[in-house]
Image (tube, rainbow, N blue to C red):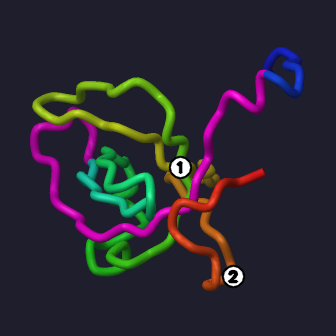
Amino acid sequence: MKPTINFDDFLKVDIRIGTIIEVNDFPKAKKQAYQLTIDFGELGLKKSSAQITNLYTKEQLLNKKITAVVNFEKKQIANFFSECLVLGIENNNKHIVLLQPTNNTIKNGEQVS
């Protein structure tokens, strides 16, 4: 378990719902990954690199709603700048399963609380 944090620490993390609108291969990544463009509604579009190629095809990801941390600093991965962190859970095979809302009425940009 990680160290205990207080509620104010949690409030610093901005987790939002977005929809993947573009998926591209990322051949320059050290580990297999996709380059994603995600629509966060009023927050706009953000890009992310995600190591989710084992469980998801590009076609399966297109228009999929996801959860992501949107207030991290940009991170350079090879020649690409990741602007948010898509959230998932590592399964028994060490592949990432995306965290996503089950209710399709959730709008892009809505905050997880």
**Residue with the most extreme front position:** 42
x, y percent for residue 5 = 85, 19
Mark 2 surroundings: few (<14), some (14-19) or many (≥20) residues within 10 A: few
Residue 67, picture quadrant: bottom right
x, y percent for residue 87 = 56, 49
* Residue marked by disc 2: 103
Please state the extent of the stretch shown in magenta in the rendering.
9-32
Q: Which dot marks residue 68?
A: 1
The amino acid sitting under disc 2 is Asn
Q: Which dot marks residue 83?
A: none
Q: Earlier in the sequence, mark 1 or mark 2?
A: 1
Of 14 and 79, the residue lying toward us:
14
Asked if 78 appears above or below 102 in the picture, the reply is: above
Q: Quadrant of the N terminus?
A: top right
Of 33 and 54, the residue lying toward us:
33
x, y percent for residue 94 = 54, 47
Number of marks in the image? 2
**Residue with the most extreme bottom position:** 104
**Disc 2 on helix, strand or loop?**
loop
Q: Residue at x 43, y 66 (%)?
A: 55
